[in-house]
């Protein structure tokens, strides 16, 4: 039976990559500066709040640095940002911007256009029967399962210092007589979590698309 081996890269330091293969043998690979960088996308058109995964390829295989550093350029307000945790580009507001990646002396970029529509628009359903309806301005209404109670909210910008990452969440302010709510959109699973801000007795509501 043919035996195959798998190499596991341990770490890079001082121009040397320490590796371990399936036989438990350590060996050294001399590293080199990156000679090319390729992104999986060169241009994107996204709706607001939408996220699109982006991957990259760095050559050669033994490149000294494998971590990519991103920078984003726009004219005034934030158009898009890079969620490095989920490895995706996230659209924030309508407009165009350029997102550039760099490693060593190699650079690559992607042009991003964000439309005035939001990926969150539509009807969302909770397991207990609540219905959340959002339009492109993120004016939202939440209705109970029997339709006897409806609460309306309007999208509002976070105040300075109010949220450590205002591009990851959406703040909705009540039209009247209700607590503000925070929406968290799970872009990987296309689900919504609604958190009643300041109302500790109310549990979060979880929604899937209707």
Image: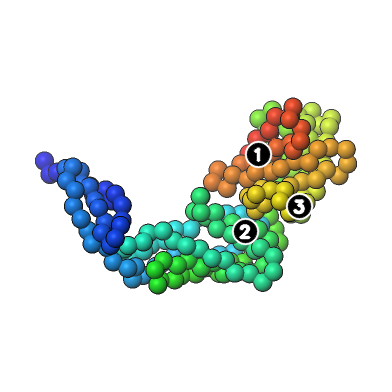
Relative to the observer, which residue lies in front, 84 or 46?
Answer: 84
Assess disc 1: are there few (<14), some (14-19) or many (≥20) residues with their C-alpha within 10 Å of its C-alpha: some
Residue 91 disc label: 2
- Give the mark toward the camera: 3 or 1: 3
Q: Secondary structure at mark 3?
A: loop
Does residue 3 appear in the picture of this structure?
A: yes
**Which residue is at 76% across, 35% downward?**
198
User: Whole-percent x and y of residue 38?
Assistant: 41, 67
**Which residue is at 34% across, 68% downward?**
34
Q: Position of 116 compared to 60: left or right?
A: right
- Report, in whole angstroms, how far the alpha carbon at label 3 lies from the one at label 1: 21 Å
Above or below 197: residue 74: below
* Residue labelled with disc 1: 193
Return the residue found at the far right: 176
Quarter-of-image position of residue 47: bottom right
Above or below 20: residue 103: below
Above or below 70: residue 149: above
Give the mark, 3 or 1, whose residue is nearer the N terminus. Answer: 3
User: Whole-percent x and y of residue 59?
Assistant: 33, 65
Quarter-of-image position of residue 90: bottom right
Q: Quadrant of the N terminus?
A: top left
């Amino acid at each position: 039976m043919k035996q195959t081996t798998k190499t596991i890269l341990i770490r890079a330091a001082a121009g040397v990559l320490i590796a371990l293969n399936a036989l438990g043998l350590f060996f050294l690979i001399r590293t080199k500066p990156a000679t090319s960088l390729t992104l999986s996308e060169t241009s994107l058109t996204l709706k607001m709040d939408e996220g699109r995964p982006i991957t990259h390829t760095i050559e050669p295989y033994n490149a000294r640095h494998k971590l990519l550093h991103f920078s984003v350029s726009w004219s005034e307000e934030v158009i898009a940002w890079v969620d490095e945790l989920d490895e995706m580009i996230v659209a924030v507001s309508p407009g165009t911007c350029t997102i550039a990646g760099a490693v060593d002396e190699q650079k690559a970029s992607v042009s991003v256009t964000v439309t005035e529509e939001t990926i969150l628009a539509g009807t969302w359903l909770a397991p207990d029967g609540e219905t959340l309806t959002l339009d492109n301005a993120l004016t939202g209404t939440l209705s109970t399962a029997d339709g006897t109670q409806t609460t309306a909210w309007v999208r509002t910008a976070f105040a300075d210092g109010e949220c450590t990452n205002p591009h990851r969440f959406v703040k909705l302010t009540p039209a009247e007589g209700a607590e503000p709510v925070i929406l968290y959109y799970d872009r990987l699973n296309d689900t919504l979590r609604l958190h009643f801000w300041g109302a500790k007795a109310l549990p979060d509501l979880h929604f899937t698309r209707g």
